[in-house]
Image (tube, rainbow, N blue to C red):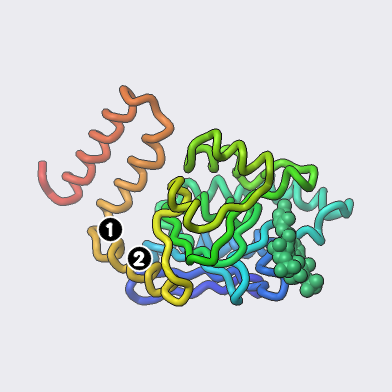
Amino acid sequence: MTTILYSTTASGLGTITLNRPEVLNAINLQMRDELWEALHAADADPGVRVVIFRGAGERAFSAGADISEFGTAPSVVEARRARRERDLWGYMLGMETVLIAAIHGYALGAGIELPMCCDIRIASDDARMGLPEVGLGYIPSAGGTQTLPRHIPPGVAMQMILTGDPIDAATALRYGLVQRVVPRDRLYTEAEALAKRILAMPADAVRLTKRAIIEGVEMPLPDALPFESNLAQRALTIRGVT
Ligand code: COA
């Protein structure tokens, strides 16, 4: 792998670093493929229970899809194939592994859509998040039109997407797009501290709870409550309480 770095620790923490700092970690097809491989490796490894995403370099988590791949015939065909065969964003939303995004600098287009497929987002105070696709004549297609209005009020999401104007970290915190804002030099320490707290929790309880929240939130409440009961019963059974 060259466009991403993937490492794991014995304590169960995986780290995926988007690693094209010379182009602000723009996500090209190779990076998509390598993310796909790393995420499958993480989810298949019972030793990895939390993954932190970060961006290499000082300036960006990621400036989004690689615009140098736009508009070339082989690339459009390739991009469609990649999307059809490898639904990266859908896969992330279904993972058992807990995903944390540590966002600094620019997080634009797919560079904020990827964090929106994570479970928890921490930003540094220099982060700027936006969806510039409409201004380029596209629509967000890494899930952004669907995930953003599920994270923040729909009217705010509509304004962000239709104007393309980025928001700063404080605004993102106010709307709940990120759960914490920390000074830039504390970003990874704080993300790792959070990961360690989750890793210290009983693994099955974390796994079942994540499932209860992610799947349950899409259900009508009368269906979601028995769904939760079922998972709660499973957690009790695993703990040997009947
Ligand atoms: N795809 C490919 N390359 C990108 C990129 C992207 N999405 N975003 C930045 N880069 C490259 C630039 O081409 C430049 O490369 P170069 O040094 O070879 O010229 C390098 O990253 C640095 O970016 P630059 O534009 O010079 O930095 P800046 O500080 O002037 O502006 C941004 C930063 C993020 C505002 C600007 O790069 C930008 O608008 N990028 C595109 C964002 C975007 O539209 N993303 C969504 C695509 S759907």
Q: Nearer the viewer, residue 241 or 12?
A: 12
Q: Amino acid at mark 2?
A: Ala
- Give the vertical position of 108 relative to 105 (above or below): above
Quarter of the rendering occupied by the N terminus: bottom right
Residue plotted at (65% across, 49% down): 165
Q: Earlier in the sequence, mark 2 or mark 1?
A: 2
Residue 16 coordinates in the image, percent (x, y): 52, 68
Q: Which residue is mark 1?
A: 203
Ligand 1 shown in quarter: bottom right
Q: Which residue is mark 2?
A: 195
Q: Nearer the viewer, residue 163 or 63?
A: 163
Q: CA distance from mark 2 to mark 1?
A: 13 Å
Q: Nearer the viewer, residue 222 or 105?
A: 105
Residue plotted at (53% across, 49% down): 91
Residue 195 coordinates in the image, percent (x, y): 35, 65
Residue 29 visible in the current orientation: no
Residue 181 coordinates in the image, percent (x, y): 43, 62
